[in-house]
Amino acid sequence: MCWHLGAGPRGLYPAPMHLFSDNATPVCPNVMAAIAAADQADHGYDGDAWSARLDGAFSDLFGTPVRALWVTTGTAANSIALACLCPPYGGIFCHEESHIVVDECGAPGFYTHGATLMALPGEGAKLSPATLVERSKAIRPDVHQVPARAISITQATEYGLVYTPDEVAAIGRVARDRGLGLHMDGARFANAVASLDCHPGDVTWRAGVDILTFGCVKNGGMAGEALLFFGPQADARAAEAARWRKRGGHLLSKGRYLAAQILAMLEDDLWLNNARAANAAATALAQAVPTRLLHPVQANELFIRLSASEAASLRAQGFDFYDWGEGAARLVTNWAQDAASVRPLAEALKALP
């Protein structure tokens, strides 16, 4: 097996080239330093100086008043957000391949005490306004059917596609017209914003998003995501989310370590620079195999056609990734890579027959 000495944007790291998931990446040195700096006595839970700075830091970033909570995992953050938007008897429109449907073990139902995930189709794991409207019209306004109460979209989607500001705004109008809350699962929000090169507010509160799960772990964090609340109900929803966080066992007694990581990601646009590096690596790989792409590459995920023998050949050279059904593979780049560091894989892909 070949071992590649990667020259990523944060220095050299000896390792085989892993493209399994951006969950498995090293912790960004800036984040590790922030954890160390927070290793001092302070108030417990979320009463510390670091947690107290989150509202202001995110308000500055998004250009609007924001209430922010740290939450230990993305699954908990998504589920708490949905519990704030949907009662137990309600329904949540979402894509049939979304993380909350496929990969969260029923956690949204657990936190909402029984709300229904109303899974819908859509190319590239994106929801369309037309599909939402059509499904809404099919729900009778009587007690015998589940009423829709929220919409959840993923940015970037499970297939690495990005909702533009106009696309989010169109879904936001559907939500507003029908009295639905709008949640955005932003596990790869940074990659989406880096791809769009837009202000983060353009694809969130200005477009009608009520609650955003702001992903950190996939972008260089160790543990912890941020749950952001926008609009006139932000204070009430944040207070409710704080209760859900405690009730669900996610209120850490030393929460300053999570808050410190999140603040470090925001400092000097580290969150955006890390995402740009990951996106650049994905673009470089996509340019090596344009005819193999199953979906456009708009963030840091590639889905490519790959036979079993071709996959075995790449793995024998030290490249690791997930098979994605028969004859396909998923490759996920990360903050510690860039276009230069993934060049060996790009060359190996080009060399495939």
Image: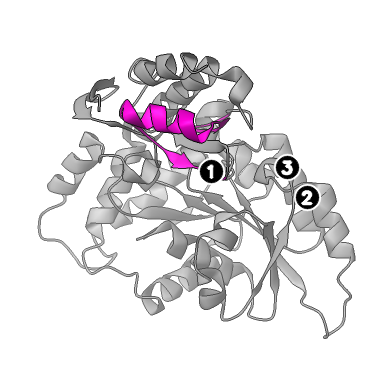
Tell us which disc is closer to us: 3 or 1.
1
Say whether disc 2 or disc 1 marks the residue closer to the N-terminus. 2
Q: Seen from this angle, which residue lies furthest front?
A: 309
Q: CA distance from mark 2 to mark 1?
A: 34 Å
Secondary structure beneath label 3: helix
Q: Is residue 290 above or below residue 269?
A: above
Tell us which disc is closer to us: 2 or 1.
1
Say whether disc 3 or disc 1 marks the residue closer to the N-terminus. 3
Q: Which residue is mark 2?
A: 173
Whole-percent x and y of residue 189? Answer: 51, 41
Which stretch is magenta?
298-325
Left or right: 310 in relation to 162: left
Left or right: 166 in relation to 325: right
Q: Amino acid at mark 2?
A: Arg
Whole-percent x and y of residue 6? Answer: 26, 22
**How many C-alpha atoms fall within 10 Å of the one at disc 2: few (<14), some, or many (≥20)?**
some
Q: Look at the image and tell me whether residue 345 can be seen.
A: yes
Residue 123: mark:
3
Q: Amino acid at mark 3?
A: Glu
Left or right: 23 in relation to 13: right
**How many C-alpha atoms fall within 10 Å of the one at disc 1: few (<14), some, or many (≥20)?**
some
Q: Nearer the viewer, residue 320 or 173?
A: 320
Q: Amino acid at mark 1?
A: Trp
Residue 324: mark:
1
Image-quadrant location for residue 304: top right
Q: Is residue 251 above or below residue 181?
A: below
> What residue sits 65% from the left and 38% below the top?
163
Secondary structure beneath label 2: helix
Residue 334: mark:
none
> What residue sits 48% from the left and 14% below the top?
350
Whole-percent x and y of residue 318? Answer: 30, 29
